[in-house]
Amino acid sequence: MMHKLINPPTVFNSLQYGFSQAILTKGCRQLFLSGQVATDKDQVTIATTMGEQTRICLENIEKVLIAAETSKHAIAMLRLYIKESANTPEAQEEISAALKAFFGEQMPASSWIVVTGLALPEWLIEIEAQAVINDEAEDR
């Protein structure tokens, strides 16, 4: 395993929200992904709810990772930009559910940032990712 999850009992249980407190990596290459939004390859927004948009963002991240010949298991850090007007407890639950469904037990570290808006008004969330790739034992 190239990532070690760090979730000490001395801080709050972030796993319930779909992320780890920290990730210790042993990789030597890093991959920085631009923010992904809920659009298809033709730049058409294809989802309207927070849960759907989060799922599409994660699927788009996975497509970029596959093109880079790695997988979601290489992701060490996420930054989620959440539109202020869409930041409700229900929306946060939808985000958490999408993260847990996508990552399973290998949840990366993350920061959730509330912003006044994103590039297009229909976008509710944008997700950036940082991956650490182990050249010797690619974890696909």
Image: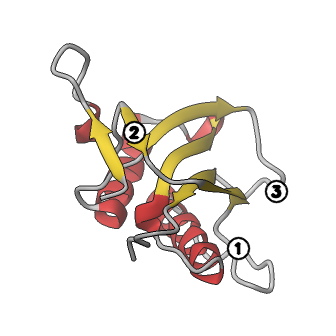
Binning the other alpha carbons within 10 Å of mark 2 as few (below 14), some (14 to 19) or many (20 upward) gives few
Q: Residue furthest left?
A: 9
Of discs 2 and 3, which sits in the foreground? Answer: 2
Q: Name the residue nearer the viewer: 47 or 69.
A: 69
User: Residue at point 52% right, 45% down?
Assistant: 77
Quadrant showing the C terminus: bottom left
Placement of 42 over or under 70, stated as above or below: below
- How far apart are the alpha carbons under marks 2 and 3? 35 Å
Q: Position of residue 53 (x, y in %)?
A: 55, 63
Q: On the rendered structure, is 109 left or right of 41?
A: left
Identify the mark nearer the N-term, 1 or 3.
1
Placement of 94 over or under 114, stated as above or below: below
Tag 2 secondary structure? strand
| Amino acid at circle 3 | Leu
Q: On the rendered structure, is 71 left or right of 86?
A: left
Report if the CB atoms under discs 1 and 3 are less than 8 Å apart: yes
Residue 120 marker: 3
Q: Label 1 belongs to which residue?
A: 45
Tag 1 secondary structure? loop
Residue 8 occupies quadrant? top left
Q: Label 2 belongs to which residue?
A: 24
| Amino acid at circle 2 | Leu
User: Residue at point 40% right, 70% down?
Assistant: 137
**Viewer can see residue 26:** yes
Q: Position of residue 35 (x, y in %)?
A: 71, 55
